[in-house]
Amino acid sequence: MLQDDRRKEQMNAVPWSHLHLPPFPQVAIQVLQLANNENVQLYQLSNLIGTDPAFASEVLTIANSCLYSPRFPASSVLQAIAVLGANHLQGLCLTVGVRTYLGKALSQPSMCALWRHNLACALIAQRLAASGFLDKDVAYTAGVMHDIGRLGLAVIRPKEYALLLGAHSGSPCSILKAEQELFGWDHCETGRQLVHDWKLPIEFEAIVADHHTPLKKNGSWSIPELINISCRLADAIGFAAFPGCEVTAYADLLEELPERERKAFFADSADLCAEISQKINALETA
């Protein structure tokens, strides 16, 4: 029995170079890199996005959706960027980029649940950040990005990951351990490596690697800590990535928030769920 366990560990300890994760859409990476340049001009971002017509179309459709609700609908990517700003653009391009990366895998219920969890987390993080005087665009981008390692692992071995989703429940630690046993890499380690390999902005490393960091009691949170509470809120209102995961009651989670942030949320979880669902649907139908 012990020998079988060791053989299983050796089989699952796959070298990173052998995981064969698909590349992230180049236009999304280039936009993120360019948007981080303080001297970038809006037309440069627009021209870059325009090199991929399908990507540009999705960006424009989402920019005109209820997610952003612009006063005047934009008819060009340049107009959309001018109205939204470069910071909004980063989160928007990541949304389109990750969805493109997932591609046909989104037709699988388990993958769709993972993706909807990410979007719900991003939208809740944005709401929390706005009430807590943090950068809401950074918070949204972090929410979209935080589980890219999990999405990547699920893309390369979807059937095995679907079984993992169904078989493992409980704490985040137990899920990380299950991923480690299945792949040789948990999703936090995978996310950090993907940020490096895809040459994404370096600040994403802390987001993907540290989003299970416990919250400080004083409410002065880092972005990874903000994502932690946002994930738990997303789970509590019905957007759990894992069907059998332990979910803290919504009312109890509100009690963990500082009073200022608590006022930004509905007393009833169903109201928040309806609002988040509407925005997710706009993102998914673009």
Image: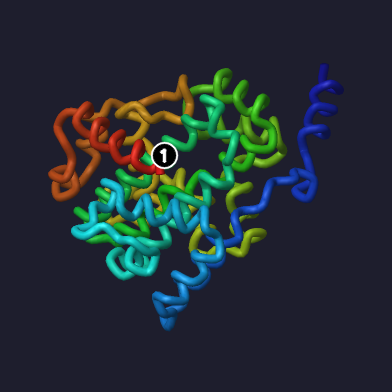
Position of the N terminus, as image quadrant, is top right
Relative image position of residue 138 (x, y in whole percent): 37, 59
Residue occupying image coordinates x 64% and y 39%: 153
Which residue in the structure is indicated by mark 1?
Answer: 284
Relative image position of residue 72 (x, y in whole percent): 21, 60
Residue occupying image coordinates x 26% and y 57%: 73
Q: How is the image coloured?
A: rainbow
Relative image position of residue 5 (x, y in whole percent): 79, 24
Position of the C terminus, as image quadrant, is top left
Left or right of 142, for residue 99: right
Residue occupying image coordinates x 45% and y 50%: 95
Outermost top residue: 1
Q: Nearer the viewer, residue 57 or 171?
A: 57
Relative image position of residue 216 (x, y in whole percent): 33, 49
Q: Nearer the viewer, residue 166 or 39?
A: 39
The vertical placement of 55 against 157, above or below, is: below
As helix, strand or loop, the secondary structure at mark 1 comes to helix
The vertical placement of 20 against 198, above or below, is: above
